[in-house]
Every structure is written in C-alpha cells, then in structure tokens.
Image (spheres, rainbow, N blue to C red):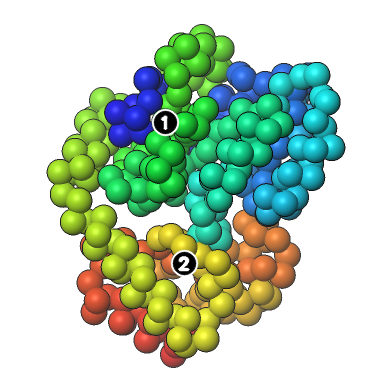
Amino acid sequence: AKLKGREDCIVYPSGYSANLGCISALTSRHDLVFTDAINHMSIQDGCKLAGAQRKIYDHSLTSLEKSLAKYADHPGGKLIVTDGVFSMHGDIVDLPRLMKLAERYGARVLVDDAHATGVLGKTGSGTAEHFNMKGQVDLELGTMSKALSGLGGFVCADGEVVEYLRFYSNSYVFAATIPAAVAAGVIASIDVMLREPERLTKLWDNIYYFRTLLLNAGFDLEHSDSAIIPVVVGDDAKTLLFGRAVRARGLFCQTVVFPGVSVGDARLRISVTSEHTREDLDEAYAILVAA
C-alpha cells in the first residue's frame, strides 16, 4: 500500500485470483464492465464470474469512449478495467485520458499493474506514478510474481474498499494465503527496489538499448514502451519455428501463439531486466538476427 500510495492492500494467492475475486466482488449483473480486448484473461474471467455485462472495446481509448457514450444513461454501476502495461504487447495505457473519460461518464477505474509494478514510475510504483497520478486510480491491482520475484496478487485501494473485499471477495476468503517466507521475500524485494534506485535506471537503459538494436534491424516491435518487447512474426507456424531456432542457440524467450494473442498476431515475447549486461543484450540480438 505504501509503494502505491494507497490506504490499504489485500493479498491474494495469485494475480489471477486477485482479478477474479476483486471484479466479481465489486460488480453484479446490474453493472457494466468496460474491458480492453487485449486485457489479461483473468480480467475477462472476473467479469464472467461476476455476471456483469461485459463491454469489450477495441485496443484504443477512442473505442472505449464510443462504448461509454453508448451506455451513458445506464442506471447501474460502471467499471473500466485495463492493463497498465499490456502483457503481450508491451504498450502502456494512456491513463490520463482514460481517467478523464471515467470522470466524464461516471465510471470507476481498475488498473492491473502486473507488468508495471517495479518497472514504471520514479520509484517503480507503477502506471499511476509514471503519469504523476499516484493515488488517483480507484483500484490498483497487481502480482508479486513479476518484478518482485515472488508469488501472490494484491489489490490496493481506499481502506473501506479493501475491507469490503476481505469479506466479499471469495478468492480471498476461501483460499490459503501466500506463505510467510514468500511474503518476507516480497517485502525484501520492495526494500531493495526503493533503497537502490539505480536498478530501475539500469533497467530503462537496457530497455532503450535493446529496443533500438531490434528496431534498427527491422524487427516489428509494435508500440512497446516497457520491459516487455514483442518480436511480431504473425504466422503461428513460422513463430514456433523461430522460437525453436532462438532457443537452440541459447536464448530463452516465450513463443506466443493463439489463444495467447489473436490469430495471425503470433510473436516472441522478450522480457528485459536490470540484471542483463550489454554483452547479454548484444548476444540476444545476434541470436535473433541469426535465427
């Protein structure tokens, strides 16, 4: 909660269960949930579990605005749910514009910061801090299994909202919590992150360096602006062959085909860290070019 600048925080067994439990607890069949078409599947499943009326908008805020305008007179609640950093594409949501739309149409906002926590913002707080909007988002959700190198999920919000979730979020109430040793490891990770800001500086140096190498070589990185760098191939079969080729040369990266992404949008998904050296990145680049 302190990292996010919020009053309170609730911890779940995983990021998936956090989305599932939070969305289903806070919405019902009378409410509308506006969700980006490429949001994480846990968000989509949370909407289904709640029975809320799910309104999927194309991956653009222009599409979201059209959907909000269409249902401007809806008598129930409205919740906009978005990834902060989109997990398979690496782009960052335009949070200031999204928040203005939410205010205009009377909607609450939930940001899934799974891939933003520990990466975006001056201290690594996430998407809100990245846009100088720390503490202004209704609900900030995330996972401790990415930059924090642990296990578990969390939701940070106002104290009353978190207290409500402790009683009505089934994936919290009826599930075991994370082990104490794991919690201690996550706390230590946050302490290191705040105590050694040079790690975040090095991460972004690595991101810019590696992304520039790949762009200059003609790779399609879409609109990635984070530690997630997709190398878009398109065809599933070609992507699988490409993935095998780079792994055979000693480079580990994820091969993502349908249903992880849309048909015809297959890619390799590379994650850059602060611990990579320039030699590591140069070698990875050489392998991708050679494969």
Identify the amino acid type marked 2.
Answer: Ile
CB under 8 Å between discs 1 and 2? no
* First of labels 1, 2 by sequence position: 1
The kind of residue tagged 1 is: Gly
Vertical relation: 282 (above or below) 264: below
User: Dot 2 lies on which element?
Assistant: strand
Q: Which mark is residue 268?
A: none
Rendering quarter of residue 55? top right
- x%, y% of residue 269? 49, 65
According to the picture, the residue beneath numbered tag 1 turns out to be 135
Q: Is residue 151 above or below residue 273?
A: above
Q: Position of residue 181 (x, y in %)?
A: 23, 30
Q: Which residue is mark 2?
A: 229
Report the residue that reaches farthest toward the bottom. Answer: 290
Q: Position of residue 232 (x, y in %)?
A: 58, 73
Q: CA distance from mark 1 to mark 2?
A: 28 Å
Looking at the image, residue 276 lies above or below residue 26? below
Q: Residue at x 30, y 69 (%)?
A: 206
Q: Nearer the viewer, mark 1 or mark 2?
A: 1
